[in-house]
Amino acid sequence: MNNELIVVAGGGGFIGGHLIGDLLSRGFTNIRSIDIKPTNQWYQHFDEVENVVADLKLKEHCVSACDGAREVYNLAADMGGMGFIENNKALCMLSVLINTHLLEAARDADVKRYFYASSACVYNADKQTSEDVVALKESDAYPGMPEDGYGWEKLFSERMCRHFREDYGLETRVARFHNVYGPLGTWDGGREKAPAAMCRKILHAESTGDHSLEIWGDGKQTRSFMYIDDCLKGIDMITHSDIIEPINLGSNELVTINELASIVEDIIGLKLDRNYNLDAPKGVNGRNSDNTLINELLNWAPSISLRDGMLKTCNWIREEYNATHGTNLTANQTAGVTKNG
Ligand code: NAD
């Protein structure tokens, strides 16, 4: 079935771009990638794919997008890191139009599998008040009290997927991603997330010689971060499984933001003076992925270590930084030994 049409909504984005690369590498030949951004702003662009620029908030664009498709992956959303989602709640909620119209169009086009990218932001805020977290299991999304704006949209869209399956027989699958990171994604401009922002800030300190590092919050907030390759594997396994309820797709390697900073400092080879911006958006105090269910149902869970993933991510961001700033920062050959500072 490698020549049946696969549609990737949000194909110009970070995860969508990697998903298309992965599908091509696995021999799929008929792929349609759709994104609202002009193609020169897509993170990855594959000539062998049908590349479409369209606003998927509009029903007619979703109808054209799903025409003839066997599988649809909805990775399109107006989103970003905490700095973006805390200040753009209405924009985040408008992504509900994308999933609504894509679901209707997929149902009418008789699509066989529909994947929806949900988020750990659906989890009840009361379960995330302490850094000392109990990992979140799938049932912790209810009673509903998700992240304002972005999380509510994700929780509502998850339920819509469920009801399209129950009422119309559309085979929807939903994964709750926990902080995905890796090369070929947002690393500056305001939508970037903590791992990329940390790499950029520490590279910038190396480049300018200003050895201070601003950390949002007190640095004690805990998170887990999933490398993109684990995410791609999980998307494929979940989409083609019989798991009909939303399921966690995340790493359970819990770190504080201070520890994330130390990992990046070690990779880059520079120790900085930290200052804590307690007024900056920092999200919940603690969050981790409980992987009991995914282990039980798929006999698999994300396992790429944060250090290994961050090394690849930092190396890519260094190249981007050099290209944009005209600098010539080089990789630290002896991680763990500080260059200066
Ligand atoms: P991204 O911002 O890199 O990609 C999303 C893409 O959707 C962008 O290229 C954007 O231009 C496109 N888009 C936005 N509005 C659109 C519209 N109206 N029509 C067509 N395209 C539109 O983000 P990502 O990190 O690749 O995330 C992909 C999905 O995974 C999103 O649904 C996101 O909410 C979800 N998710 C991501 C993470 C993460 O850590 N990256 C965590 C949880 C959930």
Image (spheres, helix red, strand yellow):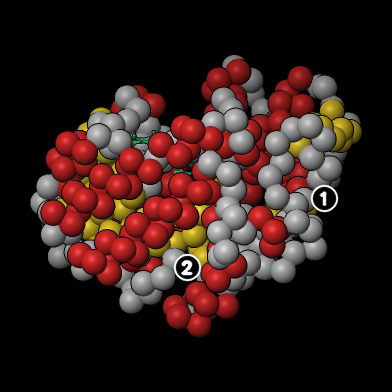
Q: Which residue occupies 82% across, 50% down?
A: 220
Kind of residue at disc 2: Ile
Picture coordinates of residue 152, whole percent (x, y) = 50, 49
The disc, 2 or 1, on the residue closer to the chain's N-terminal end is 1
Residue 229 visible in image: no
Relative to 39, residue 265 above or below = below
For image coordinates 50% across by 82% down, the residue present is 296
Q: Identify which residue, 286 or 53, lies in the foreground.
A: 286
Residue 142 falls left or right of residue 109: right
How far separated are the C-alphas under marks 2 and 1?
Answer: 27 Å
Q: Quadrant of the N terminus?
A: bottom left
Q: The C terminus appears in which quarter of the rendering? A: top right
Q: Compared to 165, does 333 lie above or below? A: above
In the structure shown, which secondary structural element does the residue marked by tag 2 occupy? strand
Residue of label 2 = 247
Choose between 321 and 134: the one closer to the eye: 134
- In the image, is residue 322 above or below residue 159? above
Q: Position of residue 69 (x, y in %)?
A: 16, 53
Residue 206 image point, x, y percent: 76, 28
In this rendering, would 155 be left or right of 114? right
- Mark 1 highlights which residue? 220
